[in-house]
Image (spheres, helix red, strand yellow):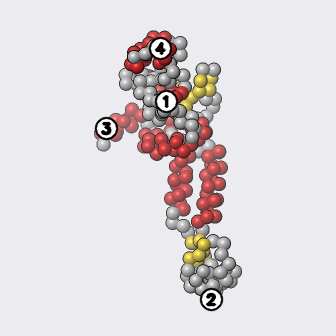
Amino acid sequence: MRISRHQLKKLVESFLSEKKSTTKVKCPKCGTVNEAGIDKCKNCKHDYDSKFDGRSWTEVKNENRLYHLFEQAAKFICPKPAKSVELNTVNRDRGIKASHIKYGPLNLNDEDYWKEYAKKWGTTAEVAKKSNCGNCVAFDISPQMKDCMPGDTSDGEGHLGYCWMHHFKCHSARTCNTWAKGGPIKEDEKSTDWFEGAKDAALFNRSHKKYLERKENE
Ligand code: SF4
Ligand SMILES: [Zn+2]
């Protein structure tokens, strides 16, 4: 699991606030579990500052704390292809070749690509160009996703984002046959929802194609 420093900082902060809000204390005299920060036991009024029969107040571990933390951490895990050049390349090449995807065009001025794409929508190339990754429902440019993508993510023609449908970094000015309106994904919360929905694929160590094959055989 690789997380960025920014994500780690958020994780530590949430750990600290979680710890503060969920730690409970057990009375050494009557065994009642009290909220943290009390002066006396709510049951027997035993003083928080004193021991009883040589026994001290003890902290009660919140069973759910680790689970919560795990959930928090899961939010910050990056999809593997966003971090791995190799996985990203394999998935992108599949996106270019697969006839139901046809990600492109490689050269943004490739009018033939746009004409072909426009046919699918029964419109002109100029109009078709406006249905691109940049406004696709699966295009993730949330702050947490930006943290997942090392290096420069924009050029003169647009910017990169993560495609939750085909699992590679795609470019806002390009498009594909499975484009759907409703994007881009700008908020961390929405990004996490997509992560939850596509977690298995996003964390799979091999190509998206292999992932789909495995799913089919299950
Ligand atoms: S599904 Fe959307 S974001 Fe992914 S490559 Fe196609 S147009 Fe781009
Ligand atoms: Zn007590």
Lower sequence index among marks 3 and 4: 4
Name the amino acid type tagged 2.
Answer: Asp
User: Disc 4 and disc 1: Cα gap in Å?
Assistant: 17 Å
The Cα atoms of the two marked residues, 2 and 3, are separated by: 64 Å
**SS assignment at label 1:** loop
The residue labelled by disc 3 is 216
- The amino acid on which the numbered mark 1 sits, given as a three-letter code, is Cys
Residue 118: quarter of image: top left
Q: Amino acid at mark 3?
A: Glu
Cβ–Cβ below 8 Å for labels 1 and 3?
A: no
Query: In the rendered image of this protein, does residue 68 appear above or below residue 184?
Result: below
Q: What numbered label is drawn on residue 125?
A: 4
**Can residue 90 be seen by looking at this rendering?**
no
Question: Which residue matches tag 1?
Answer: 136
Task: Measure the C-alpha gap from mark 4 to mark 2.
Answer: 84 Å
Mark 1 near ligand 1 (CB under 8 Å)? yes
How crowded pointer 3 is (Cα within 10 Å; few <14, some 14-19, many 20+) is rated as: few
Q: Is residue 11 left or right of residue 170?
A: right
- Against 47, residue 17 (above or below) is above
Q: Residue at x 43, y 36 (%)?
A: 206
Q: Between residues 150 and 111, which one lies in front from this camera angle? A: 111
Q: Residue at x 65, y 54 (%)?
A: 13
